[in-house]
Image (spheres, helix red, strand yellow):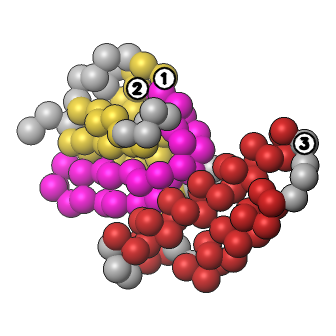
Amino acid sequence: MNTFKLKIITIRKYFFNGEAVSLTLPHIDGGSECFLANHENTVFPIIPGEMKVVDKDGKTYDAFVGDGFLEFINNEALVVCASAELPEEIDERRAKEAMIRAEEELRQERSIQEYNISQMNMARAMERLKVKNRHKI
């Protein structure tokens, strides 16, 4: 089985460090992108959404991933992101509160920059809840 070296680093921890068969990340166009062994060298932006890792033993990790980027060079992938959380690590109450806060901020008249930040906060909270609810944990 073809594998590649994968490191997923967040602000607070190493989420994954080992051999992987595949890595699927959310794409800025709304879909997702799958990376396999021997992928061409690339740098890829990551938006908040669902990430999937299949390790060399066939174990699958479904998780929420925050903003960041992937660097895939010479069959080694490095993901640097704001956060990566397994469904059981997601605090549903906190995500719902963040969504309510973002909704309220969007209703207020603010600068374009503040509006865009509120939109990203809303998207991040919604994606966390999607991951949590999809896996019913």
Who's the residue at 43% across and 72% down the image?
Answer: 132
Q: Nearer the viewer's eye, disc 2 or disc 3?
A: 3
Depth check: give the residue in front, 92 or 111.
Answer: 111
The residue beneath circle 2 is: 72
What kind of residue is marked 2? Phe
Asked if residue 57 lies in the magenta stretch, the reply is: yes
Distance, label 1 to label 2, CA atoms, is 6 Å
Q: Position of residue 129 (x, y in %)?
A: 50, 69
Give the left or right position of residue 7, taking residue 117 as reference. left
Q: Is residue 115 visible?
A: yes
The local secondary structure at tag 2 comes to strand
Q: Position of residue 99 (x, y in %)?
A: 66, 68
| Residues at marks 1 and 2 touching, judged by CB atoms closer than 8 Å | yes
Depth check: give the residue in front, 123 or 83.
Answer: 123
- Sequence order check, earlier mark of 2 and 3: 2
Q: Which mark is residue 43?
A: 1
Asked if residue 69 lies in the magenta stretch, the reply is: yes
Distance, label 2 to label 3, CA atoms, is 36 Å
Depth check: give the residue in front, 51 or 105.
Answer: 105
Q: Residue extending furthest left?
A: 1
Q: Which mark is residue 111?
A: 3
Q: Position of residue 43 (x, y in %)?
A: 48, 23
Q: Which residues are magenta?
A: 44-71
- Sequence order check, earlier mark of 1 and 3: 1
Tell me the crowding category of disc 1: few under 14, some 14 to 19, or many 20 or more residues within 10 angstroms, Cα based. Answer: some
